[in-house]
Every structure is written in C-alpha cells, then in structure tokens.
Image (tube, grey):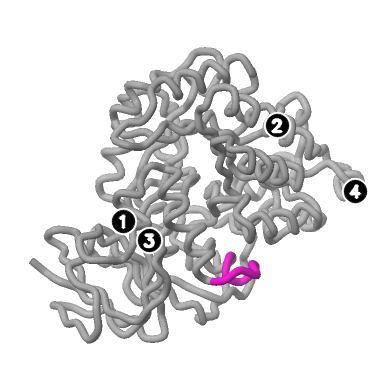
Amino acid sequence: MTTTVIAGGRILDQAGERSGDVLVDDETGLIVEVGPSLSGDRTLDATDSVTVPGFVDLHAHLRQPGNEAAETILSASRAAAKGGYTAVIAAPDIEPCADSASVVSDVMALGAVALCDVVPAAAISVGRSGEELAPLGELADLGVRLFSDEGHGVQNAGFMRNALDYASSVGTVDGAPLVLAQRCDVASLSIGAQMHEGEWSSRLGLGGAPAEAEELMVMRDIALARLTGARVHFQCLSTAGSIAMVRAAKAGGVAVTAEVTPHHFTFTHEACSSYDTNTKVSPPLRTTDDVAAIKAGLADGAIDAIATDHAPHAPDDKERPFDQTSAGVIGLETAFAVALTELDIDLAAIVGLLSWQPAQIAGLADRHGRTIEVGAPANLAVIDPHHRWIVKPSELSSRSRNTPFAGRELTGKVRHTIHHATPVVENFEATR
C-alpha cells in the first residue's frame, strides 16, 4: 500500500473548520488517520490551504460519445479534477442519447479511466422527445439517480406528471430517491431567442426569451412535485421569480431543489452587447435584479448547489455570428474561483454548495462530500483561497476554449485533488 499525507493545512467540512493533517491509503481508497503531524509515503503540502470534501458537479456536458471534437470524458475529467471535482454528473444529451441501459453502460465504461467519478444522468423520455418514458427503473438499477431531458425540459405537463408518478412509485434505490431534473423553458415562448428578452435584446436587435418562459415551467413543476410527492431538481435557474417560487415551495414542504451557475451570478444581459459568443448561454443571462436574487438565494439556502453546466463547443462553432452559434460555456476549472471571487458568503457555505449539498441531491453522499474522518472515502480537494490567477483559455484542460471568464483575475484555486486516495492534481497540475 502507498499512503499520502495532506500536511500543514486546515480542514473544512460539515463539522466545521479545524487544524489537522489527513492520511489516505490508495489500496483501500479511504482516509486512515486525521490529526496533527502525520507522515506518509508521500506528502502533499497544504500550507496556507484548506482540505475539503471533493466537489460534485450536478450538470456537465461531456460530449462523448458523439462530439469528441468538443470534449471527451477524459479531457473533461481532467478539467474537473483541476477544478476540485471528484464526481461529475454527465448530461444525457449525447449521441446516441443516454436513454437506454446500453448507452449508460458505455458512458460508465468510458469513465473508468477518468480522473474523477463520471456518473451518468439519463433521459426522462426516449430520445429526449417527451413522448415515451425511458426505462427509468432499469436505468436506476444501473446506478442512475438523476434523470433529465436536458436543454428544454419536458414540455407536456401530463407526461411530466406520469414521469413523476413513476419515480415516486420506485421510491428509493440503495437508499437514494430518483430525482427528475428540469431545465425549465416553455419552448413556445422562446422561439428564435438568442438572449434575455428585455432592454438589451431590443437595442441589439436579437430575439429574446422572457423570464416567464422559465418561470411558468418552474411553477408547473412545483405543483406537480406537490401533487406526486416526487423529487424535482431545477437546473440553471436564472430569474428572481423562479428563485422566489422555489424558496416558497421549500417553506411549504415540497421536495424541490435548485442549482445555479457561476456565469448567471456574474454577468447580466448587458454582456451580450459585445456580441461575444461566450455570453450566449441557455438560459440566457438576465438582469441586474436577477443576479442579485441569485446571490440572495445562495446566501439564504433557497438554492442548494452551484453547478457548472459545462458546455464545450469546438472553436469553429463559437466563431460564428452570435445568432448562429450554439449556446453554452465551459466552467469546470473556474467554478470554485468564480464563486469565491463573486459571492459575499463565507468559504464554508461555498464549499457546501459545491460539495456535500450536490452530493446529497445526486445520491452520492455515501462516497462524496463526506465529513473528513477515519474510514470515509478519500475524495478530497485542497484549495488555496488566496491564490490569484488570470484565466487563460489556452491553459485550460478542456478541448474547447469557450469561457466567458477569459482574461479575468480570480481569487482561489485548487492546489491538489485526491480521487479515491490517489492524487490526480498536485500543485495545480493534473498528474496525467
């Protein structure tokens, strides 16, 4: 066996913050000792840094199979590891769609060589068409806990009710419930949309999606979650109205959770005035009031998680005119730093939003986001909350370069990442 000690830093997890070294064993993949002045076969220096449970991304587009020019599971996992992630939920919008046991099994096999756990989400409906229910039970038996039709959400209310009824009837599998995730967008209100409908879309002459396109589906699915008792997770919320409804639903005991992205709490729709295609995202960047509401929701618990919605696109796609390019940006390597730079909440809250809270939603809390203690799986990140760096797209690990944070100085960076007790990032660089 080989042991690694994370030495000289502090520890921060659900139990609070404290001094201590952490010793992990790569044979068992577990934490074997926590305490002062430990030694091991190798040492990761954590001076002026903080050891935390590894991050979990609820929402990343890994593109493989089907679009390996933009990303592969290996390249995405390298970016994820450099961002402190020890688990990533792989979105089902691949080719072929992850709506069957065979495709989900293929993704799992491709993930076997990744630098983090790659956990497939699966489609709610066959082909994400909203017409025929995917075999949710069979997929759950494979380990799928999160289901999403990705991109536009389930449009038909009756179909969504049936899917939620089925998920509720399954109950829990290995102690975790099935969760239906929605990217809320009433498609008939967003036809031709390139950005948020408002002052700047009028100025720029671009088609817009109103806030109501998101909010109507959020309202509907809160009602359906209340009706069926099933769990609904809202992806990439972007409007003040959506967040207010989720906050009220939680207060009323409805089983809903929600995530937001770093780009939605950093930029407003005014950023699109540059016609920079890296400001074209879905849902679109919204108003100053919406950004303020997102930040308030992160601070008061209305929002449960920060997810990246990592959406790589090959350069020739993002070099097209604004109204012809695909929506989406990459974010795995920058999420922690953007959160620390932009949010006025403490480090423990940020780590919770990136680690143990999404782990709970994804059904991964048995092995990710765990308290740092003897016997726990050694999925850890060591973060330097004071490290200042400038985002240079050419130095990122993704195959794609479509980041809206290019050239921006950020505070906070992941120094080391330990996946199942194996260092996969050391001193800010991936080990393979």
Label located before the other in sequence (2 or 1):
1
CB within 8 Å, label 4 to label 3: no
The x and y percentages for residue 88 are 41, 49
> Label 2, label 4: how many angstroms apart (C-alpha)?
25 Å
Amino acid under disc 1: Leu
Question: Which residue has dot 2 on it?
Answer: 219
Amino acid under disc 3: Gly
Which residue occupies the extreme front position in the image?
A: 252
Q: Secondary structure at mark 3?
A: loop
- Which label was assigned to residue 199? 4
> Label 4, label 1: how many angstroms apart (C-alpha)?
43 Å
> Label 2, label 3: how many angstroms apart (C-alpha)?
33 Å
The answer to which of 316 and 245 lies nearer the viewer is 245
The answer to which of 403 and 40 lies nearer the viewer is 40
Q: Is residue 321 visible?
A: no
Residue occupying image coordinates x 50% and y 28%: 230
Q: Is residue 194 visible?
A: yes
Residue occupying image coordinates x 58% and y 65%: 339
Q: Secondary structure at mark 2?
A: helix
CB within 8 Å, label 2 to label 3: no
Question: Which residue has dot 3 on it?
Answer: 54
How many residues crowd mark 1 within 10 Å: few (<14), some (14–19), many (20+)? many
Stretch of the chain drawn in magenta: 339-346
